[in-house]
Amino acid sequence: MPKFRFLCTCGNQAEKFASPKTEETDCASCGSKMKRQFPGSGSQQVREVVDSFTNTRQTPDAKTENLARKTEYFWEVEVPRLIQTYSLATCLDEGWLVYNDKGELVINKPPSKR
Protein backbone atom coordinates (compact mmCIF):
# COMPACT_ATOMS: atom_id res chain seq x y z
CA MET A 1 0.00 0.00 0.00
CA PRO A 2 1.28 3.48 -0.77
CA LYS A 3 1.70 6.20 1.82
CA PHE A 4 -0.53 9.28 1.43
CA ARG A 5 -0.67 12.60 3.23
CA PHE A 6 -4.02 13.52 4.77
CA LEU A 7 -5.03 17.02 5.94
CA CYS A 8 -7.83 17.94 8.35
CA THR A 9 -9.74 21.23 8.66
CA CYS A 10 -8.40 21.52 12.23
CA GLY A 11 -4.86 21.72 10.80
CA ASN A 12 -3.76 18.23 11.72
CA GLN A 13 -1.61 16.47 9.12
CA ALA A 14 -0.87 12.78 8.97
CA GLU A 15 0.85 10.37 6.62
CA LYS A 16 -0.86 7.01 6.47
CA PHE A 17 -0.67 3.86 4.43
CA ALA A 18 -3.94 3.62 2.53
CA SER A 19 -5.50 2.20 -0.59
CA PRO A 20 -5.36 4.48 -3.65
CA LYS A 21 -9.17 4.45 -3.60
CA THR A 22 -9.28 5.94 -0.07
CA GLU A 23 -10.19 9.63 -0.27
CA GLU A 24 -10.91 10.34 3.43
CA THR A 25 -9.91 8.99 6.83
CA ASP A 26 -10.77 9.90 10.43
CA CYS A 27 -8.77 12.61 12.22
CA ALA A 28 -7.09 11.43 15.42
CA SER A 29 -7.36 14.82 17.18
CA CYS A 30 -10.85 16.14 16.33
CA GLY A 31 -12.64 13.09 14.89
CA SER A 32 -13.76 14.74 11.64
CA LYS A 33 -12.77 13.54 8.17
CA MET A 34 -9.25 14.16 6.83
CA LYS A 35 -8.93 14.58 3.06
CA ARG A 36 -6.16 13.00 1.01
CA GLN A 37 -3.79 15.49 -0.61
CA PHE A 38 -2.35 15.22 -4.08
CA PRO A 39 1.13 13.66 -4.09
CA GLY A 40 2.90 16.91 -5.01
CA SER A 41 0.74 19.15 -2.86
CA GLY A 42 2.64 21.06 -0.22
CA SER A 43 6.02 19.73 -1.22
CA GLN A 44 9.08 21.84 -0.59
CA GLN A 45 11.43 23.05 -3.30
CA VAL A 46 14.37 20.71 -3.79
CA ARG A 47 17.58 22.41 -2.70
CA GLU A 48 20.36 20.03 -3.43
CA VAL A 49 23.60 20.90 -1.68
CA VAL A 50 26.36 20.19 -4.15
CA ASP A 51 29.29 20.96 -1.84
CA SER A 52 28.56 20.52 1.87
CA PHE A 53 31.89 22.10 2.93
CA THR A 54 31.21 25.47 1.26
CA ASN A 55 27.40 25.00 1.32
CA THR A 56 27.30 25.73 -2.42
CA ARG A 57 23.97 24.96 -4.02
CA GLN A 58 23.27 24.03 -7.60
CA THR A 59 23.56 27.04 -9.88
CA PRO A 60 20.73 28.10 -12.21
CA ASP A 61 22.81 27.28 -15.28
CA ALA A 62 23.68 23.79 -14.01
CA LYS A 63 21.53 22.28 -16.76
CA THR A 64 23.71 23.84 -19.47
CA GLU A 65 26.88 22.82 -17.59
CA ASN A 66 25.67 19.21 -17.37
CA LEU A 67 24.76 19.22 -21.07
CA ALA A 68 28.24 20.53 -21.96
CA ARG A 69 29.83 17.81 -19.81
CA LYS A 70 27.72 15.11 -21.47
CA THR A 71 28.60 16.43 -24.93
CA GLU A 72 32.30 16.51 -24.08
CA TYR A 73 32.13 12.94 -22.74
CA PHE A 74 30.30 11.75 -25.85
CA TRP A 75 32.92 13.15 -28.22
CA GLU A 76 35.95 12.13 -26.15
CA VAL A 77 34.89 8.65 -25.02
CA GLU A 78 31.88 7.35 -26.92
CA VAL A 79 32.73 8.48 -30.47
CA PRO A 80 36.06 6.56 -30.56
CA ARG A 81 34.19 3.45 -29.37
CA LEU A 82 31.48 3.96 -31.99
CA ILE A 83 34.08 4.38 -34.73
CA GLN A 84 35.60 1.02 -33.84
CA THR A 85 32.18 -0.63 -33.83
CA TYR A 86 30.36 0.79 -36.87
CA SER A 87 31.19 0.79 -40.56
CA LEU A 88 32.89 3.67 -42.37
CA ALA A 89 29.68 4.63 -44.18
CA THR A 90 27.76 4.88 -40.89
CA CYS A 91 30.52 6.94 -39.25
CA LEU A 92 30.54 9.38 -42.18
CA ASP A 93 26.73 9.64 -42.19
CA GLU A 94 26.61 10.30 -38.43
CA GLY A 95 29.40 12.90 -38.69
CA TRP A 96 31.81 11.09 -36.38
CA LEU A 97 34.46 10.92 -39.12
CA VAL A 98 35.24 13.62 -41.69
CA TYR A 99 37.84 14.25 -44.35
CA ASN A 100 40.23 17.14 -43.62
CA ASP A 101 41.81 19.52 -46.16
CA LYS A 102 44.56 17.02 -46.98
CA GLY A 103 42.02 14.30 -47.76
CA GLU A 104 42.78 12.33 -44.59
CA LEU A 105 40.04 10.67 -42.60
CA VAL A 106 39.94 12.14 -39.05
CA ILE A 107 37.60 12.19 -36.05
CA ASN A 108 35.24 15.13 -36.26
CA LYS A 109 35.41 17.90 -33.66
CA PRO A 110 32.49 18.35 -31.27
CA PRO A 111 29.90 20.98 -32.20
CA SER A 112 30.94 24.51 -31.28
CA LYS A 113 29.63 25.99 -28.04
CA ARG A 114 27.24 28.85 -28.54
Image (cartoon, helix red, strand yellow):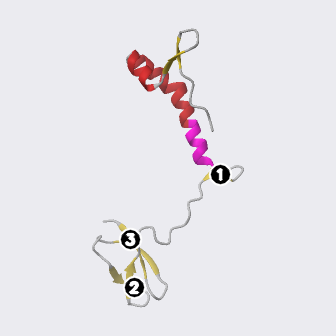
Between discs 2 and 3, the one toward the N terminus: 3
Q: Identify the residue at horizontal 46%, vertical 71% (top origin).
A: 41
Q: Identify the residue at horizontal 69%, vertical 53% (top origin).
A: 55
Q: Residues within 10 Å of mark 3 (few under 14, many from 20)?
A: some
* Quadrant (top left/top right/bottom left/bottom right) for the C terminus: top right
Amino acid type of the residue that numbered disc 1 sits on in the rendered structure: Thr
Between discs 2 and 1, the one toward the N terminus: 2
Q: Residue 40 or 63: which is nearer the viewer?
A: 63
Above/below status of 11 relative to 4: below
Above/below status of 30 relative to 44: below
Q: Where is residue 62 shown, x and y percent of the image?
A: 61, 47
Q: Where is residue 22 shown, x and y percent of the image?
A: 30, 76
Q: Residue 67 or 10: which is nearer the viewer?
A: 67
In the image, the segment drawn in magenta is 58-69
Q: Is residue 22 left or right of residue 107?
A: left
Above/below status of 111 relative to 87: below
Magenta residue check for 40: no
The residue at which mark 3 appears reads as 4
Instruction: Give me the disc on residue 48.
Output: none
Closest to the camera, between mark 1 and mark 3, is: 1
Above/below status of 10 relative to 72: below
Amino acid type of the residue that numbered disc 2 sits on in the rendered structure: Cys
Q: Tell me where residue 101 sits by quadrant.
A: top right
* Mark 3, secondary structure of its residue: strand
Q: CA distance from mark 1 to mark 3?
A: 32 Å
Amino acid type of the residue that numbered disc 3 sits on in the rendered structure: Phe
Closest to the camera, between mark 2 and mark 1, is: 1
Magenta residue check for 68: yes
Q: Residues within 10 Å of mark 1 (few under 14, many from 20)?
A: few
Instruction: Give me the disc on residue 27.
Output: 2
The residue at which mark 1 appears reads as 59
* Mark 2, secondary structure of its residue: loop
